Image: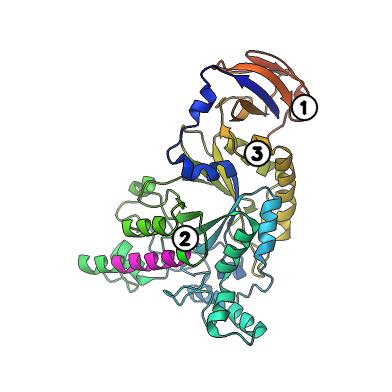
Amino acid sequence: MLTINSCSEQAPVKQEVVQENQEKTGWFSDARYGMFLHWAASCIYGGEISWSRAGDPPDSWHSGGKIDPVLYDDSFKIFNPTEYNPDEWVQLAKDAGMKYMVLTTRHHDGFSMFDTKYSEFKITHPESAYRKWIAGQNPSLNDDEINRKTDLVRQFADAVHKGGLKLGFYYSEPDWVREDYRIALTGRNFKGDSLNAAEQEAAEKAYQDFMYNQLEELTTGYGRVDLIWFDAIKPAHASEIGGKAAVWIDERTLEMLRKNQPGILINDRTGFSPDYVTNELRDTRYIPYLVAESCNKIGDPYWSFSSAGTVKPAQWIIDRLIINAGNNSNLLLNVGPGPDGRIPQMYYQPLLEAGKWLKENAQAFYGTHGGPYLFEKWGYSTFRDNKIFLFIKDAGDGILQLPGINLTLISAKTMSGAVLEFNPLSIIHQPSAFHKLNPK
C-alpha cells in the first residue's frame, strides 16, 4: 500500500465527496466494515436459515427446502443456546476491526428472536427450550423477568451498546408461516383456495399491522437502533417476478421508524427511497454519490450455521475490504452462530488476522472515500482530504502510471514510511513491496 499527498487549487478530491443525507449517513460510510449475523432456532439442523424449510413458500423465488416444516417450526423446542454471550461476539467484531453489527431479529421463516407481543412463534414461547433453561437458572424471577432474560435480541442490543458499536436489526418482510402474508401476496390461503380482492386487501392490512407493531417494538424497546436491514426482493427486481412481487412495509411504518429513531438508516429493500443500497454476494462497483454496502459471508455454504461448513481465508477478507472501500462501499461480513450460542471457532483466525492487517492500515479505510483513481488495472485507491492511499494488485515493472487528474503530487511513500521517487503522473517503486490481491 502506498500513500501520496497532493494539492490542488480547486480541491477536486473534496468536491467529489457530495452525498445527499451526508450528515445522517456519515457514520456509516466512515465505518466501512460491519458484522452480519444470521441466527435462528433452526440452526440446530445445520441447514440454511429459512430456505431449508420444506413446504410451499408463497414467494415465487423459492420452491422449498428439505427439512419437514413441522420439525423445522418446532426447532425452538430444542434450540438452547446456553453458551450465548453477546459480549464475546462484540469483542470479536471489535478485534476484527468492525464498527457495526446487524442481527437477524426475524427471518423469512417467521420466527422472532425477541419477546414480541404480536406472535407466539418466538424465543420466549412457553415451550422454548432456552426459556425453560433460563427459568431453571433463575427460579426467583417472574414470567416477565424470565422473558426479558430470554430475549436474545435484547441481550445482543445491550452488548453492542456497551461495546460502543453501532446497532442494526435485520428484519424480513416475507413471512412463510403466516397465512395473512400468503393471502396478501398470492390471493390464496393455506388450502390453496382463491380469495376475492377484498379478502386479499384485508389480509394485507393485517400483515402490514403486524410488521408495524413488531418494528415499533424493535425501535422503542431496545435503545438506539442505527439501521434496519430489511430483506425482500428489491423493487428494482420486482418486474422480473411478475404479478405481486412483494409486500413491503407501508408509508405509515416508514414514518413510525423515522419518528422513533430519527437517525435510523434504511436499506433498499422496501418500496421507498433508501438511505443506502446493498449488494449481496458481490463487490460494489463505484457509482458517484451512492452510499453502498456489499454483504458477503465468510462461511460456506450457508449464511447460517453449518457443522460441515468451510471458512474463507483472511486474504479473501482483506481483498473484499480493499475492493469495496476503493469503490466507496462498506463490507458487511456474515458469520453464522451455532446452536450453543457461540460463533464457531473456525471463523476467529481469519477474522482476527484480517483485523490485525486492518489495524495496521486503518487510516486508508476508516473515514475515507473511494477514488480518486477508479477502475484502474493496477488496483484501487481511497482518499481523505489531500491524502490518497493506493492498493496495488499489479505493480508491473515498478513504475506506476497514474491517470491525469487535477492534482499535483507533493510526496509519495509506503505505509511503512519509505519515501518513493515520483513525478506528476507516475510513482517509481519496487514491485515486491506492493500489496498483492487474490484475483478471486
Q: Does the magenta segment cover residue 209?
A: yes
Residue drawn at the location 67% of the way across and 63% of the way down: 87
Along the viewing direction, whichever of 99 and 83 lies nearer the viewer: 99
Residue that label 1 marks: 417
Work out whether residue 177 can be spotted.
yes
The amino acid at mark 3 is Asp
387 in relation to 141, above or below: above
Residue drawn at the location 57% of the way across and 41% of the way down: 30
Q: Element under label 2?
A: strand
Which one is earlier in the sequence, the residue at label 3 or at label 2? 2
The amino acid at mark 1 is Gly
Asked if the residues shown at circle 1 and circle 3 are in contact, with their CB atoms under 8 angstroms apart, the answer is: no
Q: Element under label 1?
A: loop
Return the mark for residue 319. Answer: 3
Along the viewing direction, whichever of 242 and 80 lies nearer the viewer: 80
Kindly give the residue lying farthest to the bottom in the view shown.
140
Of the 4 image quadrants, the one containing the C terminus is: top right
User: Marks 1 and 3, Cα distance to the nearest angstrom?
Assistant: 22 Å
Q: Residues within 10 Å of mark 2 (few under 14, many from 20)?
A: many
Work out whether residue 308 can be spotted.
no
User: Marks 3 and 2, Cα distance to the nearest angstrom?
Assistant: 29 Å
Q: Main secondary structure of the magenta part?
A: helix
19 in relation to 398, above or below: below
Return the mark for residue 171. Answer: 2
